[in-house]
Image (spheres, rainbow, N blue to C red):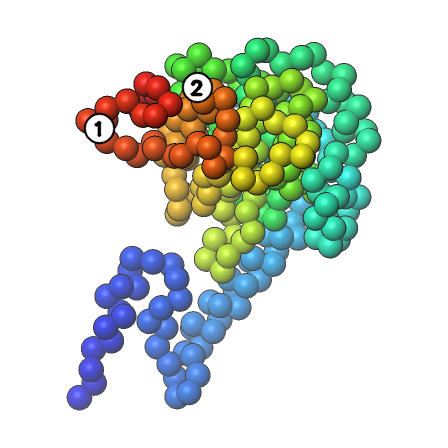
């Protein structure tokens, strides 16, 4: 008489590899094939190129005109081997951004970047921005210049924010793919961006995708963080995410912030 597998009931709650079963001393064929497929999808996500023209057209259809730039990494191989190049603008990109009119006071620059998963930026950046825009408008904040960058790391947003004169920069970047999430988008907020900011001076909302954190919920959290950062004048470790604090607990530490 076989004993019931205590893990089997938990499997329906997670995409993690649990309760795979076994065939002799090995994994069942179906589990091994699924692992091979997921590994291939993750590798493809890292290598795939962002379709900048298609993303620009999709953004423009919603009145979000975007400028295309690139980091100092000349190609994907260099980007993967030299993270430092992905944190710096190419000379052409720096000149393009420096020539732009100054951003409106208090505006939020947006950098949409391929990162380690172009598929994430391609699929989720626009839905997230469309969910975020009305929340920012309700708070009196405006989306500033939208920039699309290739071969980009998170810190590239510091230079973008500084050159455009934005109050803050929001970097929407494809995160390192996992074996169950090749299309996960991360959103990184930095108040008063400038080159040399550290990761401790940023706030991050991660795993943005339908199977993770939905676009609407991510937009709610980001709007809360942006409003709190404006009141505090800082982001990162100085800004605790209290967006889920019950309203009955009274005003947040950073002043009254809309839900």
Q: Residue 66 lies in what quarter of the image?
A: top right
Residue at 70% across / 22% down in the picture? 163
In the image, is residue 228 above or below residue 12?
A: above
> Is residue 92 visible in this depiction of the protein?
yes
The residue sitting at the left extreme is 1
The residue sitting at the right extreme is 91
In the image, is residue 90 above or below residue 66?
A: below
In-image side of 62 versus 159 (left or right): left
Crowding at dot 1, Cα within 10 Å, few <14 / some 14-19 / many 20+, comes out as: few
Q: Position of residue 126 (x, y in %)?
A: 51, 31
Q: Residue 23 lies in what quarter of the image?
A: bottom left
Q: Position of residue 94 (x, y in %)?
A: 77, 27
User: Which of pointers 1 and 2 lies earlier in the amino acid sequence?
Assistant: 2
Between the residue at mark 1 and the residue at mark 2, the CA separation in whole angstroms equals 19 Å
In-image side of 205 versus 54 (left or right): left
- Compare residues 88 and 66 and report the one nearer the observer: 88
Residue at 47% across / 53% down in the picture? 181
Task: Confirm or deny contact between disc 1 and disc 2 (CB under 8 A).
Answer: no
> Which residue in the structure is indicated by mark 1?
249
Q: Secondary structure at mark 2?
A: helix
Residue at 62% across / 34% down in the picture? 197
Crowding at dot 2, Cα within 10 Å, few <14 / some 14-19 / many 20+, comes out as: some
Residue at 44% across / 12% down in the picture? 140
> Is residue 119 visible in this depiction of the protein?
no
Q: Residue 215 lies in what quarter of the image?
A: top left
> Which residue in the structure is indicated by mark 2?
231
């Amino acid at each position: 008489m076989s004993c019931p597998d205590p893990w089997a009931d938990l499997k329906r709650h997670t995409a993690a590899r649990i309760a795979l079963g076994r065939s002799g001393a090995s994994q069942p064929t179906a589990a091994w094939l699924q692992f091979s497929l997921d590994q291939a999808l993750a590798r493809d996500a890292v290598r795939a190129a962002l379709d900048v023209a298609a993303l620009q057209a999709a953004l423009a259809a919603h009145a979000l005109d975007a400028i295309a730039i690139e980091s100092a990494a000349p190609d994907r191989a260099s980007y993967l081997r030299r993270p430092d190049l992905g944190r710096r603008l190419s000379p052409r990109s720096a000149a393009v951004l420096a020539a732009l009119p100054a951003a409106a006071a208090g505006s939020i620059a947006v950098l949409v970047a391929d990162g380690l998963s172009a598929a994430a930026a391609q699929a989720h950046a626009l839905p997230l921005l469309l969910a975020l825009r009305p929340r920012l408008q309700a708070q009196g904040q405006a989306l500033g210049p939208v920039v699309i960058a290739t071969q980009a790391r998170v810190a590239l947003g510091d230079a973008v924010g500084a050159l455009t004169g934005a109050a803050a920069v929001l970097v929407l970047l494809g995160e390192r793919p996992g074996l169950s999430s090749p299309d996960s988008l991360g959103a990184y907020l930095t108040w008063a961006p400038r080159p040399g900011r550290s990761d401790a001076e940023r706030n991050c909302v991660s795993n943005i995708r339908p199977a993770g954190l939905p676009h609407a919920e991510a937009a709610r959290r980001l709007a809360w963080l942006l409003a709190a950062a404006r009141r505090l004048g800082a982001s990162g470790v100085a800004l605790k995410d209290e967006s889920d604090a019950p309203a009955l607990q009274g005003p947040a530490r950073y002043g009254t912030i809309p839900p």
